[in-house]
Image (cartoon, rainbow, N blue to C red):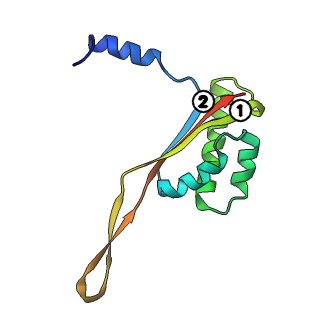
Amino acid sequence: MAKGHRSKIKRERNAQKDNRPSAKLSYARISAQKACFVLDAIRGKDVKSAIGILTYNPRYASSVILKLLNSAIANAENNNGMNPEKLFIEECFANQGPTMKRMHPRAQGRAYGILKRVSHITIVLNER
């Protein structure tokens, strides 16, 4: 059962709003598993070293995540007035999005299903 009136519940939920700078990329055309390989390499690192890791990482996900990290840094600087030199990556994760289902023709008139996976990538920064 609900605890209190709907407006009270909403008020309490909005009071606990997270003020850490973040950036989210929805429907990135890369699987969450492949994105997590790159995210694991930069989790907990300061922003400068994370940019260096992403710049020289050969995986496709690193270019997508580098753009997202630059966006999170800009959000921290412009919206929260934080110093970019003191920032570090507090949280980063990739959640699975909706899967696009496609068909590929095979021998003898059969069809073969292809799953094109999509993910939602989130980066949350904080100041040291």
Which residue is disc 1 drawn over? Answer: 87
Looking at the image, which residue sits at the far left? 1
Q: What's the amino acid at mark 1?
A: Leu
Look at the numbered disc 1 and give the secondary structure of its residue. Answer: strand
Identify the residue at horizontal 46%, vertical 14% (top origin): 15
Q: Position of residue 63 (x, y in %)?
A: 63, 55
Identify the residue at horizontal 63%, vertical 43% (top origin): 43
* Earlier residue among tags 2 and 1: 2
Nearest the viewer among 65 and 75 is: 65
- How far is the residue under mark 2 from the one under mark 1? 10 Å
Q: Does residue 15 sit above or below 64 in this rendering?
A: above
Is 96 on the left or on the right of 71, as rendered? Answer: left
Q: What's the amino acid at mark 2?
A: Pro
Q: Residues within 10 Å of mark 2 (few under 14, many from 20)?
A: many
Quarter of the image for the C terminus: give it. top right
Q: Quadrant of residue 75?
A: top right
Quarter of the image for the N terminus: give it. top left
Label 2–label 1 contact, CB within 8 A? yes
Which residue is disc 2 drawn over? Answer: 21
